[in-house]
């Protein structure tokens, strides 16, 4: 599972500012059947969900893809999106300097202004999911999506190999 970074009290107030963005994330996993028809698996997520992620097993076909449809129902905002095969899960996020109650270093998953200040990512990466190491040769595709009220933005990820694919979305504050 994709876990959000631990939030401080200051970050908790930031999460309240995310409520203005009523994100409707519809994940459509389109599968072509052997009869040539189209079957789709849809999962609707919104900004009130504590974990904006869904996963499903998929196999390739001539038009098999994962499609994210993002709709800002009020104001504008920026959303970090990621699609990946679960086999690449260990590469998601970067270890921060903070430790949890058990002495384990916490992980940060989205490049925000505090993550830039902590040296976990660059200003150019702000608004994207963080990945530990090079993503070349992996299934990982990250996108920063700038939303506009009333407009639907789509991200399409072609599925070329059988796998257990996951889609994630996270708050990405405006660039500093």
Image: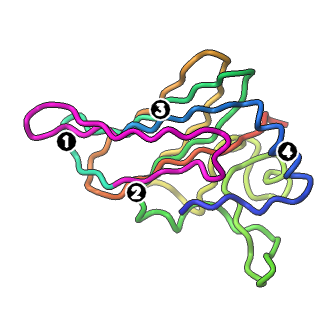
Q: Are marks 2 and 3 in contact (CB under 8 Å)?
A: no
- Front one among 71 and 121: 71
Q: What is the span of residues highlighted in magenta in the rendered image?
A: 29-56
On the image, numbered disc 1 is attached to which residue? 61
The answer to whether residue 106 is magenta is no
| Colour scheme in use | rainbow
**In this rendering, the label closer to the viewer, 2 or 4:** 4
Binning the other alpha carbons within 10 Å of mark 2 as few (below 14), some (14 to 19) or many (20 upward) gives many
**What residue is shown at x 26% (from left), y 52% (from top)?**
161
Mark 3 / mark 1, whichever is N-terminal: 1
Dot 3: what SS?
Answer: strand
**3 lies left or right of 63:** right
Residue 47 in the image, given as x and y percentages of width and height: 66, 39
- Residue placed most toward the observer, 39 or 99: 39
Q: Relative to 3, is 33 on the left or the right?
A: left
Identify the residue at the far right of this view.
10
- C-alpha gap between disc 4 and disc 1: 42 Å
* Alpha-carbon span between mark 2 and mark 4: 30 Å
Residue shown at the point (91%, 57%) measured from the top left:
9
Compare marks 4 and 1 and give the one earlier in the sequence.
4
Q: Could you tell me if the residues under marks 4 and 1 are in contact, i.e. CB atoms within 8 Å?
A: no
Q: Secondary structure at mark 1?
A: loop
Residue carrying label 3: 155
Residue 72: horizontal and vertical position, in percent?
A: 64, 25
Instruction: Give the residue number, with chain letter if any, for mark 4.
Output: 14
Q: Which residue is mark 2?
A: 85
Gap in Å between the C-alphas at discs 3 and 1?
18 Å
């Amino acid at each position: 599972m994709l876990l959000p970074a631990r939030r401080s009290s200051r970050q908790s107030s930031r999460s309240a500012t995310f409520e203005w963005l009523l994100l409707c994330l519809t994940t459509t996993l389109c599968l072509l059947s052997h009869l040539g028809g189209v079957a789709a698996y849809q999962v609707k997520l919104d900004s009130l969900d504590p974990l904006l992620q869904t996963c499903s097993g998929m196999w390739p076909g001539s038009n098999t893809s994962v499609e994210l449809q993002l709709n800002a129902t009020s104001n504008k905002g920026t959303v970090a999106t990621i699609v990946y095969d679960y086999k690449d899960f260990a590469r998601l996020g970067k270890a921060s300097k903070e430790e949890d109650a058990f002495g384990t270093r916490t992980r940060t998953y989205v490049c925000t202004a505090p993550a830039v200040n902590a040296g976990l990512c660059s200003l150019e990466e702000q608004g994207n999911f963080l990945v530990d190491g090079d993503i070349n040769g992996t299934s990982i595709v990250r996108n920063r999506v700038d939303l506009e009220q009333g407009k639907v933005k789509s991200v399409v990820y072609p599925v070329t190999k059988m796998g257990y694919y996951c889609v994630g979305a996270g708050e990405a504050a405006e660039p500093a």
